[in-house]
Amino acid sequence: MSELILHHYDFSNFAEKARLMLGFKGLAWRGVEIPPIAPKPKLAPLTGGYRRTPVLQDGADVWCDTNLIARELERRVPLPTFYPRATAGADEALTRWAEQQFMRPTALYVSGINADHMPAGLHEDRARLHGLPTPSIEAVRKAAIRNLHLVRPQIQWLADMLADGRPYLLGTVPCIADFAAYHVVWFYRGRHIDCRAVFDPYPRLLAWRDRMAVIGHGRRTDIDADTALAEARAAEPAPPRPSLPQEGDPKPGAPARVRPADNAKDWVEGKVLFIDAHEIALLRHDPEVGDVAVHFPRLGYDWRST
């Protein structure tokens, strides 16, 4: 197996999830630091305009979204598993809660408390990502207080899961839900103002957080973006697995476009290379890197035939 490339930036919580997953699988990987806001001129040739963080690359194949990245890592390195049989179903449901219901107010709270210390243009960029007008700094600060009241009961839910002394959220071994909830908790350390005091009343939650952190990031080596682009240019997309299209799906070879379903404006267009109930991969051509396969999860994404 070639050494994977993770396109990320250090303060991205979803990138922290990916880094920890790579560590859990005991993998060596290379990291490319990407800008936290658009434009991302050395990522776009690989992704066709998908701009969220992180993105995993192996040659001329790239995987978008940490939930699909988890499945690709699991396919390559089955053990230790993100998906223990004993927690099947509950782990995925808890993951969706953590990343959709817990993460959004967390981001507004932590970013609002740190409103004066975030990278220039970040508030405007994130508002544009969600189709919203640019907020004033005062509005961002006020949103922090409103959202603190939304995160507190959800923190209590996490603490309640651990109240019986179990080491992980759903049992004796970590599952994908632990990684999904951990990266949200990790984000509370903020940029300048540390927000982690909200966890102080919950010693078992703190112990779980520290237990997850010990997993580490595996063996990381940093490289520049031009090296990653050169590897894509020198490679061809891997042969796809057999497709299993569902009713109404575009067939392999048909033109299609994909985007995140939560108000994202930018479509990635190409020809369907692979499709099943969990994944859709588009084959696209970029003059800078040649043919690239861009892989997306089905859940949380919108696709259209073109």
Image (cartoon, rainbow, N blue to C red):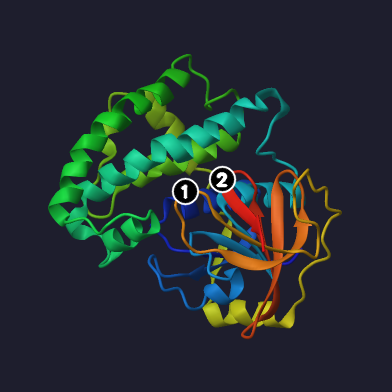
Q: Earlier in the sequence, mark 2 or mark 1?
A: 1
Residue drawn at x 51%, y 78% is: 42
Asked whether 165 or 90 is in front, the reply is: 90
- Mark 1 packing: few (<14 Cα in 10 Å), some, or many (20+)? few
The location of residue 203, given as percent across then percent down, is 35, 25
Give the quarter of the image for residue 220.
bottom right
Name the residue at the right extreme.
Answer: 242
Name the residue at the left extreme.
Answer: 138
The location of residue 280, given as percent across then percent down, is 70, 54
Work out whether 229 lies above or below 110: below
Q: In this view, does 19 lie to the left or right of 279?
A: left
The location of residue 121, given as percent across then percent down, is 27, 66
Judge whether residue 102 can be spotted in this image.
yes
Q: How many marks?
A: 2
The secondary element bearing badge 1 is classed as loop
What residue sits right under mark 1 in the picture?
262
- Marks 2/1: CA–CA distance: 8 Å
Judge whether residue 162 can be spotted in this image.
no
What residue sits right under mark 2 in the picture?
300
